[in-house]
Amino acid sequence: MIESTFSIVKPDAVAAKQTGAIIQMILDAGLSVKAMKMIRLTRAQAEGFYAVHSARPFFNDLVTYMISGPVVVSCLEGENAIAKYRDLMGATDPAKAAPGTIRKNFGKSIEANACHGSDAAETAKVEIAYFFSSLEIVG
Ligand code: CMP
């Protein structure tokens, strides 16, 4: 099934000049980029994006980290894109991520873990719409 998913290259990876290498891994995995931009999130935007985690002890640190520098957000498409991208990212904690995954290659910690990807179809829809209008997504 062809699906869309949402990706963030996080501030640590952008600052470390790893954006290009991460996008290349995404393309090599057979996913295509339907929209992409670099933005610097405001605190309110980051809090809104991660609202589902607002009760978690790491929420404030996560938001502060996510606004610490620019991020590259994208809409990805492909066969089973949601699971495919999650497999490519690897475990949330880079120390537990499998060899060859983005987080194993580029993640620095469970917080500065290089990338984010949607966890389900409904989440992907909400996350894509949070950052992109339909006019910005290549048909
Ligand atoms: P992400 O996929 O962006 O979703 C929520 C983020 O919270 C997660 O990646 C991690 O970077 C971050 N995070 C920080 N601490 C934790 C933790 N203890 N457990 C899960 N996620 C965490």
Image (spheres, helix red, strand yellow):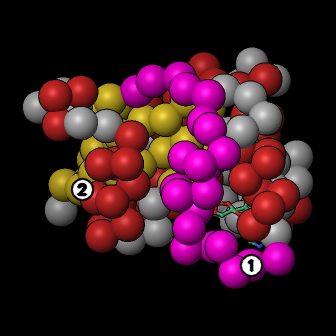
Ligand 1 - quadrant of the structure image:
bottom right
Indicate which disc residue 97 carries. none
Where residue 4 sits in the image (x, y, percent)? 28, 51
Identify the magenta region.
Answer: 36-57
N-term mark: 1 or 2: 2
Which residue shows up at 30% across the image and 48% down it?
129
Q: Is residue 132 visible?
A: yes
Dot 2, crowdedness within 10 Å: few (<14), some or many (≥20)? some
Where residue 127 sits in the image (x, y, percent)? 39, 54
Which residue shows up at 69% across the image and 81% down it?
55
Q: Which residue type does callout 1 highlight? A: Arg
Indicate which disc residue 56 carries. 1
Front in this rendered view, residue 43 or 8: 43
Q: Is residue 87 visible?
A: no
Name the image quarter holding the C terminus.
top left
Residue matched to label 2: 3
